[in-house]
Image (cartoon, grey):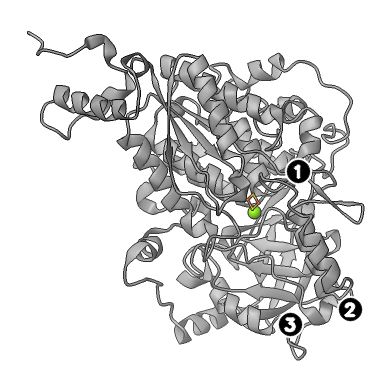
């Protein structure tokens, strides 16, 4: 077959040829595309290189990504040194404290933006740059669906600050100092002073919150370079990792190392082990379930719980322990942890380097004396950080972060003090006439995926002021919401099904007895089935929906916590199995 005339065969970049369907014949579409990119000053020589897209999530609303200009420069340098052509493009960026009603409400939108821009634009590989809590899961979800060679770079943690010579960092210490202020232990002058010190630089929260958790899980999944999880945002280590990430993306483009070869059941199993061993954020399990769902895998919560029984918490970071991310980095970062965890890991799992996780652990070499990652025989906490609860209050399961809960409350029966929704809570939690005692159980309804909507991090219900000023530091709390990875307390979360769709939580009343037994993994509402049936008949559920727009899409299609709070139509259409096996 004779080929049509081509202006210059050699000048075609592999990536630029992707998706040429819009303007008549393909050759003309490529001709147009090249004319436009040359308008930006590119030469033919540049356009012969593999094209590496870079998802740029810099935003003035996102200080956790405040080092984006430097990271972009370093990633581009790495791509060009390795012979690729970097083309960065913007996507949605989400910051925890600026996104209303909650960042989680927007995570799936960011994942759709990421997926569709990877699909729409010609590129041979993609470097995802994210950091703040929802951004990394959103990017991995989108890329998993788009399925091209993908490497993740996180922005890195912020530095810690110092308040009156005490070391502080967001946001475990934000909560601790606000708690002191509510309990009238410190005055408004001091709380204003500490506000200047909590976030000492750009970068993500400096404790084992969701951002740090996702950084560690990303490395455990094999989706970032070895050593990429822990360098703080402003360090030269972070910039070197960025440069190397760019270079590796070019190699992945040559090797066609697509994301489906990395996001295997073994990879998710490793990530679940790491989540348990770092005392990671409870949000980590929701995000892992969502990413897994994009490649057709279901996460079995009961098995996560079984894994937790033989996976100790080894990492001594706040809120479960003492240190901060920069200390973890100085202690060798993930290599130190993975070396200790090695007997429990699936070492054959593939990583972005083209080598297996086991090979990377070997390459990292021997460890050294340090005090941030404990050995398996001297753990921070003997079991995994997260326990999975079941019972008539949560037929689809609930979770508790046992490593940051009060040991004396983990076997507890008490009287329910019920709040119907977040607004009801805000109105009454500090009332002097609130009927509440320290051994009661606070119940908050309607903060699940559809209830709030977006499953906000309101599960960290504050201690009622009248108890806080009496010195009460912890109380059992139950909700269908999430909590920040930086929070701590005896807090039962992700109650499934949620109250807004008629889960049993919806029918809890003031004065009901509830039993929590973490040792038996039980969360029980001590009310007869007949009584509950009567309550259901008296107040039938009305499914939440909205008139239009993204809120309608969200309410009509969002799944429950066990499915990752993803939209049902974004999950893979074929199920490939359950993890762990
Ligand atoms: Fe962005 Fe904590 S607010 S990581
Ligand atoms: Mg957070």
Say what secondary structure mark 3 lies in: loop
Numbered badge on residue 159: 1
Residue appearing at x 46%, y 66% in the figure: 450
Other residues around mark 1 within 10 Å, as few (<14) / some (14–19) / many (≥20): many
Residue 502: image location, x then y, percent:
48, 72
Asked if 108 appears above or below 233 in the picture, the reply is below
Q: Earlier in the sequence, mark 1 or mark 3?
A: 1
Q: Which residue occupies the extreme right position in the image?
A: 165
Direction from residue 397 to residue 369 in the image, left or right? right
Q: Check whether the beta carbons of the residues at disc 3 and disc 2 lie within 8 A of each other.
A: no
> Which residue occupies the foreground of this view, 444 or 66?
66
Numbered badge on residue 430: 3
Other residues around mark 2 within 10 Å, as few (<14) / some (14–19) / many (≥20): few
Say what secondary structure mark 1 lies in: loop
Q: Judge depth for marks 2 and 1 and give the one in front.
A: 1
> Which residue occupies the foreground of this view, 5 or 149?
5
Q: State how far apart marks 2 and 1 are (Cα).
A: 34 Å
Direction from residue 441 to residue 220 in the image, left or right? left
Q: Which residue occupies the extreme bottom position in the image?
A: 433
Residue 293: image location, x then y, percent:
45, 43
Res 349 visible: no
């Amino acid at each position: 077959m004779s080929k049509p005339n081509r202006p210059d065969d050699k000048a075609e970049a592999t990536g630029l040829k992707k998706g040429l369907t819009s303007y008549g014949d393909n050759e003309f579409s490529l001709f147009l595309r090249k004319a436009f990119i040359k308008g930006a000053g590119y030469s033919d020589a540049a356009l012969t290189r593999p094209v590496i897209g870079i998802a740029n999530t810099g935003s003035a609303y996102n200080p956790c990504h405040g080092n984006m200009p430097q990271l972009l420069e370093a990633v581009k340098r790495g791509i060009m040194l390795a012979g690729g052509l970097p083309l960065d493009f913007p996507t949605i960026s989400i910051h925890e404290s600026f996104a209303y009603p909650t960042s989680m409400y927007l995570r799936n939108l960011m994942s759709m933006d990421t997926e569709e821009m990877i699909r729409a634009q010609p590129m041979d590989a993609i470097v995802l740059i994210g950091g703040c809590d929802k951004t990394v899961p959103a990017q991995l979800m989108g890329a998993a669906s788009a399925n091209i060679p993908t490497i993740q770079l996180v922005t890195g943690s912020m530095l810690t600050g110092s308040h009156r010579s005490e070391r502080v960092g967001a946001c475990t210490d934000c909560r601790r100092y606000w708690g002191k202020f509510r309990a009238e232990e410190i005055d408004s002058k001091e709380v204003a002073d500490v506000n200047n010190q909590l976030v000492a630089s750009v970068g993500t929260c400096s404790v084992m919150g969701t951002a740090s958790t996702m950084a560690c899980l990303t490395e455990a999944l094999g989706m970032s370079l070895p050593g990429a999880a822990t360098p703080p945002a402003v360090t030269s280590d972070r910039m070197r990792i960025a440069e190397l990430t760019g270079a590796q993306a070019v190699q992945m483009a040559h090797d066609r190392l697509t994301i489906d070869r990395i996001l295997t059941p073994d990879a998710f199993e490793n990530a679940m082990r790491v989540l348990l061993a770092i005392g990671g954020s409870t949000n980590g399990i929701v995000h892992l379930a969502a990413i897994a769902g994009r490649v057709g895998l279901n996460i079995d919560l009961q098995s996560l719980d079984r894994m937790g029984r033989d996976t100790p918490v080894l990492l001594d970071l706040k809120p479960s322990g003492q240190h901060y991310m920069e200390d973890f980095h100085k202690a060798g970062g993930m290599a130190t942890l993975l070396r200790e965890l090695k007997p429990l890991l699936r070492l054959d799992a593939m990583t972005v380097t083209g080598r297996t996780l086991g090979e990377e652990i070997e390459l990292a070499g021997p460890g050294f004396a340090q005090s941030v990652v404990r050995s398996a025989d001297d753990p921070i906490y003997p079991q995994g950080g997260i326990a999975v609860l079941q019972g008539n209050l949560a037929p689809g399961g609930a979770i508790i972060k046992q490593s940051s809960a009060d040991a004396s409350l983990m076997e507890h029966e008490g009287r329910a003090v019920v709040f119907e929704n977040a607004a009801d809570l805000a109105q009454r939690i500090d009332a002097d006439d609130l009927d509440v005692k320290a051994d009661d159980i606070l119940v908050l309804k309607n903060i699940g995926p559809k209830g709030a909507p977006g499953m906000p991090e309101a599960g960290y219900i504050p201690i009622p002021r009248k108890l806080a000023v009496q010195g009460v530091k912890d109380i059992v709390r139950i909700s269908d919401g999430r909590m920040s990875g930086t929070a701590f307390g005896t807090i039962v979360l992700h109650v499934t099904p949620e109250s807004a769709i008629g889960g049993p939580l919806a029918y809890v009343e003031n004065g009901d007895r509830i039993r929590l037994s973490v040792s038996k993994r039980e969360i029980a509402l001590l009310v007869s089935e007949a009584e509950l049936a009567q309550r259901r008949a008296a107040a039938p559920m009305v499914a939440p929906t909205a008139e239009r727009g993204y809120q309608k899409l969200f309410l009509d299609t969002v799944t429950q916590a066990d499915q990752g709070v993803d939209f049902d139509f974004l999950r893979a259409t074929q199920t490939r199995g359950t993890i762990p096996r």
